[in-house]
Amino acid sequence: MSTPFTDLTQSMQTQADGSQTVAIPEGWSQGQSTYGGLTAALGLQGVLNANDDLPPLRSALVNFVGPAAGEVVVKTDIVRPGRSMTVAGANLLGERGLATRSTFSFGVARESLFDETHLPAPDLVGPEDADADFQGPHRPTFTQYFEARLAQGGRPGSGSAQTNHYLWVRFRETLTPSVVSMLALADMPPPAMVPRFPVPKPISTVTWMVNMLQVNPQPFDDGWWLLQSRAEHAAQGYSSQDMVMWGAGLRPVIAGRQLVAIYL
């Protein structure tokens, strides 16, 4: 069954106890679980559904605890309300228990001496000149909802020497960018060590930290975002990487970090 992202988030149903339920179709699977970017986004959507007066999202901490698929439950709470910063939590549970635990920090804008960035976008080919990615038989099922084009770096399972990769990514569906859709899209690139694999092997993201750098950012023309994943260290079956996402005007919109379990 194919269910686009917008339809899926809009299908969340609030129950009598305040929890929210949603059925995740197999089309969003990644290995034996659901695509992590989607489970994080469902947690955020659950928080926004339950609280309509939150300031902009500034940061998210996501722990992928276990697998989730099919009917899931999202339970949210306000960890700490504040005048300038509110912290909310979201637990996404599947039939086998807790699957994703997220903490979201929402903060009002304040006057500041600084308004600067130190994350310049590299000079790369545009999406119209980049090669299509995720075309092989081993591509994760969830990638059907995205279009991705490799601007620089290696392809998954190719034995590449590259550990720094740039992808142009957009949803295949037409949607209005939101903080929820951006969170879902930001996790789309494969972990930075995966192109180093000589053959396809399983991976599993353990933790993901995301900082939102802009409020209401916009993509490049035709809905494209430029995403980077860069491996910093890999040993003992784990890889540490950082991630950046740029939007219109080559402005950075997300900075993130992940710990990934690699089974090779």
Image (cartoon, rainbow, N blue to C red):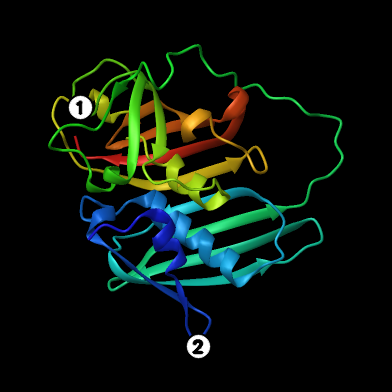
In which quadrant will I find the N terminus? bottom left
Query: How far is mark 1 from mark 2, CA to CA?
Result: 47 Å
Q: Please tell me whether residue 12 is drawn above or below residue 31 in the rendered image.
A: below
Question: What is the quadrant of residue 161 in the picture?
Answer: top left
Please state which of the two labelled residues, at mark 1 or mark 2, is closer to the viewer. 2
Question: What is the quadrant of residue 24 in the picture?
Answer: bottom left
Q: Residue at x 59, y 18 (%)?
A: 120
Residue 38: x %, y % from top left: 40, 54
Contact between labelled residues 2 and 1, with CB atoms less than 8 Å apart: no
Q: Residue at x 48, y 48 (%)?
A: 175
Horizontal side, residue 48 vs residue 171: left or right: right
Using the rendered image of the protein, determine whether residue 53 is visible from the camera's viewpoint.
yes
Horizontal side, residue 145 vs residue 51: left or right: left
Nearest to N terminus: mark 1 or mark 2: 2
Nearest the viewer among 172 and 264 is 172
Residue 252: x %, y % from top left: 60, 29
Residue carrying label 1: 197
Residue 139: x %, y % from top left: 20, 38
Nearest the viewer among 232 and 163 is 163
Using the rendered image of the protein, determine whether residue 191 is visible from the camera's viewpoint.
no
Nearest the viewer among 75 and 258 is 75
Residue carrying label 2: 16
The amino acid type, in three-letter code, at marker 2 is: Ala
Mark seen at residue 246: none
The total of numbered circles placed on residues is 2
Q: Residue at x 50, y 58 (%)?
A: 102
